[in-house]
Amino acid sequence: MKILTKRRNLGLGLAAIGSALMLATFSVHTQEIDPILETSRQAAEDTAGSQERIDEIDSETQRMLNDYRANLKQLEQLERYNASQERQIESQREELASLEEDINNIASLQRAMQPLMDDMVGALDRLVEADLPFLMDERSSRIERLQAAIEDPELSPAQRFRLVIEAYQIENEYGRTIETYRGDIETGGRVYENVEFLRIGRVALIFRTDNDEVLKRYVPEEDSWVDLDPSYLQDIRTASRIAREQIPPELMYVPVRAPKDAE
């Protein structure tokens, strides 16, 4: 019994010693592994941080690339816009040069316009004097107003020229229209008041009294009024009604001068 007890105690002691040795060995290994594990953990954390920074750099790079592309597109648009503006500016420069040339031409034209208008008004005055003597007061007054207008410093050359052209247009209309008007006339030593004049273009000028007792036409070659054959009376009445737009135009017979060859 004593021997068994001793052996059992010895086994227990050996087991305790083995456990102690194992604990000591585990402690030693633990002390050796911990730095390695810490290093691995730190490396993993550093790797994760590096990856995060890489992702951030990649995102920032992508953003900068997108901005770069957008800026390139905007630059292209601005270059095209600038080119368009340059073309417009060049066109405006050419237009300015043309306007300056026109202004210089206008200045020289204005200097030439005054003598031209003087000649035109003078020619118009001579035309009225040589023409059939219809509406003489009205036409002479128009000439006088023109002569005053072309000397008026308050009127621009353009305004004066417009008045001259308007007077020419009015005189031109007389050559292709027919009209009647009333007025007084003295001829053959007698004054006829409020008679009806009939003008047919510039080829015939006739007047008659209301009672149709006097019917005369103007003869430019004689510069006088001569009696008109009463056979024309009905045609003259018809022409007067046409001139007053009381009836539509129709064929009528009126005395006119025979054409002559120009000398």
Image (spheres, grey):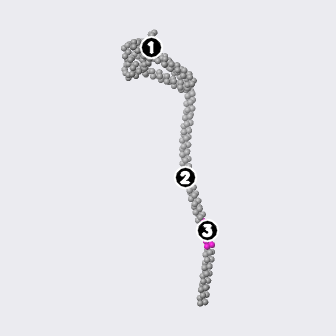
N-term-proximal mark, 3 vs 2: 3
N-term-proximal mark, 2 vs 1: 2
Amino acid residing under circle 1: Glu
Task: Please report contact status of discs 3 and 1: CB closer than 8 Å, yes or no.
Answer: no
Tell me the SS state at disc 2.
helix
Q: Residue 62 at what x, y percent from top left?
A: 55, 55
* Residue 222, quarter of picture: top left
Amino acid residing under circle 3: Glu
Residue that label 2 marks = 66
Residue that label 3 marks = 38
Residue 156 sits inside the magenta stretch? no
Q: Residue 86 at what x, y percent from top left?
A: 56, 40
Q: Residue 152 at what x, y percent from top left?
A: 56, 22
Tell me the SS state at disc 3.
helix
Tell me the SS state at disc 1.
strand
**Marking on residue 193:** 1
Residue at 45% over, 11% down = 191
Task: Estimate how packed mark 2 is, as few (under 14), some (14 to 19) or many (20 or more) residues with alpha carbons within 10 Å.
Answer: few
Disc 3 versus disc 1: nearer the observer: 1
Q: Which residues are magenta?
A: 30-43
Residue 33 sits inside the magenta stretch? yes
